[in-house]
Image (cartoon, grey):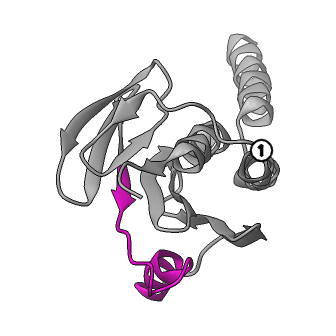
Amino acid sequence: MKKASLLAAFLILSAFLFACSASIEDEKKKTLEDVEHIFNEEAKKTNEETDEISFRLPFTASVAEESEHNVIIERSNNTFVLFHHRNDEAGNDVIYNMTTGSTEEPWLVNETFEEEGRFGYVLLRQVDEEQVEIVTGINDVKMTTVSEVKDVSSNAKWMMETVRSAKWNKE
């Protein structure tokens, strides 16, 4: 009798946890909605600056390291890479094309946006059962990380806010 009660409680708890956990399908849908909305919004004011670019970071994130074309950002025990490389002759989609062409592994999401001379994108690729690679970008700035499935949409949202806010310091 006691075993049956424990088994029933375990099954109910398992079903509850499964129902509450984020699915990749839900996260994909929310990510696409959020990222496209941010792409179309006005850029937020910048609050960080490197030699090359200025950009906005949430107060929960900080710059850990800088190099010529990369800014390593730490947020909630996660690492994000903000890549920037200005090449006016190459076109707005060169970084996107290099990123999507660098692997034969399929992207779960490969969505692009264009408006007023801006080219934006979001890419999602399954790394393993619990992790997803996220890439967001606009023109010659992109940001990438590996995220837990449950955090995909929230991470993609602030990543797109960051690349949307990026401005070159020397025009």
In the rendered image, which quarter contains the C terminus?
bottom left
Picture residue at 49% right of the left edge, 46% below the top:
147
Percent position of residue 26, x then y = 79, 48
Residue at the outermost top position: 2
Q: Is residue 93 left or right of residue 79?
A: right
For residue 82, above or below residue 74: below
In the structure shown, which secondary structural element does the residue marked by tag 1 occupy?
A: loop
For residue 85, above or below residue 47: below
What amino acid type should be assigned to the residue bearing mark 1?
A: Glu
Tell which of 54 and 70 is nearer to you. Answer: 54
Tell which of 99 and 170 is nearer to you. Answer: 170
For residue 64, above or below residue 156: above
Tell which of 82 and 133 is nearer to you. Answer: 82
Q: Report which residue position mark 1 lands on.
A: 41
Number of residue marks: 1
Q: Is residue 53 left or right of residue 24?
A: left
Magenta region: 81-104
Asked if residue 96 lies in the magenta stretch, the reply is yes
Picture residue at 72% right of the left edge, 53% below the top:
39
Picture residue at 75% right of the left edge, 17% below the top:
9
* Quadrant housing residue 4: top right
Picture residue at 33% right of the left edge, 36% below the top:
49
Percent position of residue 79, x then y = 33, 41
